[in-house]
Image: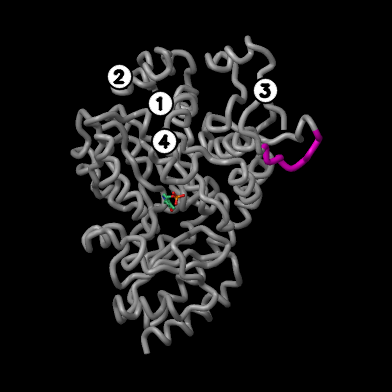
Amino acid sequence: MSDDAPTYGFDTLQVHAGSRPDPATGARQTPIYQSTAYVFRDAEHAAALFNLQEVGFIYSRLTNPTVAVLQERIATLEGGVGAVCCSSGHAAQIMALFPLMGPGRNVVASTRLYGGTVTQFGQTIKRFGWSATFVDTDDLDAVRAAIDDDTRALFCESIANPGGYITDIDAMAKIAQEAGIPLIVDNTSATPYLCRPFEHGASLIVHSTTKYLTGNGTVTGGCVVDSGTFDWSASDKFPSLSAPEPAYHGLKFHETFGPLAYTFHGIAIGLRDLGMTMNPQAAHYTLLGIETLSLRMERHVANARKVAKWLEDDPRVESVTYAGLPSSPYYSRIEKICPRGAGALFTFAIKGGYEACVKLVDAVEIFSHVANLGDTRSLIIHSASTTHRQLTEDQQKAAGAAPNMVRLSIGIEDADDLIADLDQALSKATA
Ligand SMILES: *Cc1c(COP(=O)(O)O)cnc(C)c1O
């Protein structure tokens, strides 16, 4: 598609955005540019590239043509101005915070987050002198109170994994705006097909492309997407973007690149110095996956609704926390935040507690017992004994991963087969 293309629908963009037939060969599918470096036309060209006066390929730690297509595709689907792909979702989270933070600075984050993010923010980022303050994002006064002079970002998930929780992104964005800091939304569980955080006021989005965007459980990856709307120069809070950046011979990113400042910083400093680069093979698998994103998400959501409803009506089940069920306290947020559905991840509690949960994951046949989500295959995990094991019981409950709960990631198989599998496994688990 040409750059001045009219605005196309989501289904068209997920197939075409960012890609054109290969100019060298005419190859229609995006080639895997398995090359570490790119030949400069001449010394002047090389100098212009290194000065960021001209955009082009230098070295694949920074940019790669296959990865660039994926970056443009994800940015387009999210409605952002730019994106930087990384080696994993967790890498993307560090990359997202990196231009904003510094020693003594903090991020205010929702308690309802992916377990690995709670550990990364609660423990590991302290090694950089950063810290996180966790708050219940349904308590807006608590969110406001948690923000102090050293806060540099507010962080939440759109559809929070694994507790069947939908964040009121508009309310979070308003608080972030009042505080003069960006709202970062992890949109992994929703994908841009179900939720578009920028339309609700978010400034930045992170993804684990490992999940639904790739969709087939093949490669890890992550992405940071910039809306291009945050004014980095409105205060002196973000010197890496607004003031001369010592790590790039005093370049002022915001003044020089305007709305693309954050994306350029992510490549020129973030990828250059942290090196959490996505490789072109991974980008290839993710590009293949994204072509069918809307089709898969529709089936994921339809199956999740059926399975969740069946579980809710089953006497062996204590509760189901799927925001797509009218019984969910977050059902009313769907229309505003994710009108095409509440995703395909949810938890349910079974009678018989921890022991019955462990038996259940051993008894399923179609569902795979794995620490992953967002695959075409249906997946099951007992979070309390695996992904959320490092957390205290209070943290587990806050994250929606109590010991008597099992998490499902509903795939795109026949819903009736998934229900039959859970039926037989529940019989064994609660016998
Ligand atoms: C998986 C996941 C991550 C971490 O992504 P990786 O690709 O595994 O590093 C972050 N957030 C959410 C919501 C996830 O599901």
Q: Which amino acid does label 3 sit on?
A: Val
- Residue at 30% x, 50% y: name it: 119
Query: Which percent across, then down, holds residue 24?
Result: 79, 30
Q: What residue type is labelled 1?
A: Phe
Closer to us: mark 2 or mark 4?
A: 4
Label 3 sits on a secondary structure element that is: loop
Q: Mark 2 = which residue?
A: 235
234 sits to left or right of 106: right
Q: How crowded is mark 1: few (under 14 residues within 10 Å), some or many (20 or more)?
A: many
Q: Mark 1 = which residue?
A: 230
Query: Is the C-beta separation of discs 1 and 4 under 8 Å?
Result: no
Q: Residues within 10 Å of mark 2 (few under 14, many from 20)?
A: few
Q: Mark 4 = which residue?
A: 95
Q: Marks 1 and 4, Cα distance to the nearest angstrom?
A: 17 Å
Q: Tell me which corner region of the image, top left, top right, bottom left or bottom right, holds residue 254.
A: top left
Range of magenta residues: 25-33
Q: Marks 2 and 3, Cα distance to the nearest angstrom?
A: 40 Å
Q: Does the magenta stretch include residue 32?
A: yes
Q: Is residue 256 above or below residue 136?
A: above
- Residue at 65% x, 26% y: name it: 38
In this view, the residue in front, 203 or 100, is: 100
